[in-house]
Image: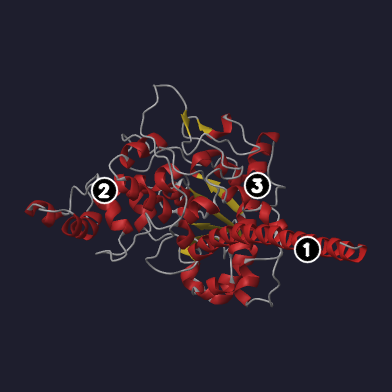
Amino acid sequence: MNLRQVFVSLLMFGVAGLLLFMYLQAWIEGQHTASGEKLQQQITNQDAVIANCLDEIPSVHCKTTTKHNWDFTLPPPGTQRKVVQSGHVPPGRSRQEMTISGSRHWQGKADPFGAVAVSLVSRLSNQQKISEPPLSQFREVYLPLALRPLNKTLVKGDEWKDVGSTQEKRRSFLYEFCQKYNSRKKLRTHLVHMVSRIYVEDRHKVLYCEVPKAGCSNWKRVLMVLNGLATSTHNISHDDVHYGKHLRKLDSYDLKGIYTRLNTYTKTIFVRDPLERLVSAFRDKFEHPNSYYHPVFGKAIIKKYRHNADEEALKTGSGVKFKEFIQYLLDSHRPVGMDIHWEQVSKLCYPCLINYDFIGKFETLEEDANYFLQLVGAPAELKFPKFKDRHSSDERTSAEVVRQYLKELSKEERQLTYDFYYLDYLMFNYTSPIV
């Protein structure tokens, strides 16, 4: 072999090696791109689930991909209940924050179920924001560019500092959640319908959106006192609160009156852990005599979901079981419509369309309510009432009580019930069900 042939052989070998190197590099980059696209698709799919939940579509609820390890082993008396989903404690949270002591648990930190709620707000700054044309008048009215700061000039004393800090975190969390997932197609809901659950108190310029089973009866008593309709919350009966029609709702005003109040009054909403609220409503309406819910809802539920129902049950509608109630709730072809006592908060008060100034929670009801009363300049002697409106001898519906009711359901029914209230869990930063 002469020198020329040796040179040509080396050259061809070098070219072949270079081509192989370029091929391998392209293959590796392709693998990275595919992995990134797959990860981005997973994020996009989860975002789509949440966005779809925000649609105002009747009788449709969200189906999540979050599966729960439902543990029904009761802890020893006196011990704390842990949030059971996985043994993982999200970054930035302590074991103590992942437990519930009694019925009060602050929800100001990131939601621990799945990776979804933990990253809801953090991904806002990491993802490229898509510009869109100016929105309609609805968006301008309900979603201003920035949160309106609370006027705290009337709050007296340093004891409210922690409550105020918690309030700011709740407001920011909900606002950023809605900024991320709200879209123009959600604005098709009629304005008058959107404000139909909001009560008006003109003297102190308060708008209160009623969420049943989250302290609403006592809140109406407070509004009546603020409005000069009563001297004390203790003198107002249950029937006067709910059937007296002493308070005006926002939908009773003309459009100018609605817009003016939405933009200038202090708007508040009080919420509750969704499953606690659901079980509380069931106990109130179906485990006690009721001349409306038994014949209207009970009869229809028993007729459709109870096999071999006896004549007495079909005639009276009394004795609905929790499992039957859940079957009705999850049925896309319910024999009777929804009710405000178990409707999702997202469809009662539209918190991503109406920018609420104050977000209270049933878990911290008394301190939240009394702080709010100071904010709006209520009389110093007016305090939020502590008494239970009805069935005062019954044990309050707590996480422990909820656990007992959930035992009656299958694993699939528990998951679907959580899915039904998925958006409420996300919007108000509640942890996944504690069972």
Residue found at the far right of this picture: 3
The quadrant in which the C terminus is found is top left
Residue 352 at x, y percent in the picture:
57, 62
Dot 2 amino acid type: Lys
Q: Is there a contact, CB below 8 Å, between mark 2 and mark 3?
A: no
Residue found at the far front of this picture: 1
Residue drawn at 33 percent across, 52 percent down: 239
Disc on the earlier residue, 2 or 3: 3
Q: Nearer the viewer, residue 278 or 148?
A: 278
How far apart are labels 2 and 1 at the CA level?
Answer: 70 Å
Is residue 434 positioned above or below 331 on the image?
above
Disc on the earlier residue, 2 or 1: 1
**How many numbered marks have been drawn onto this rendered protein structure?**
3
Q: Which residue is mark 2?
A: 323
Q: Which element is circle 1 on? A: helix
How far apart are labels 2 and 3 at the CA level?
Answer: 37 Å
Is residue 295 positioned above or below 260 on the image?
above
Label 2 vs label 3, nearer the camera: 2
Q: Which element is circle 2 on? A: helix
Does residue 55 show up? Answer: yes
Category of crowding for the residue at label 3, using alpha-carbon neighbours closer than 10 angstroms: few (below 14), some (14–19), many (at least 20) = some
Residue drawn at 72 percent across, 57 percent down: 125
Is residue 127 positioned above or below 409 on the image?
below
Label 2 vs label 1, nearer the camera: 1
Residue drawn at 60 percent across, 39 percent down: 90
Dot 1 amino acid type: Ala
Residue 169: assigned label: 3
Residue 16: assigned label: 1
Does residue 265 show up? Answer: no
Residue 393 at x, y percent in the picture:
31, 34
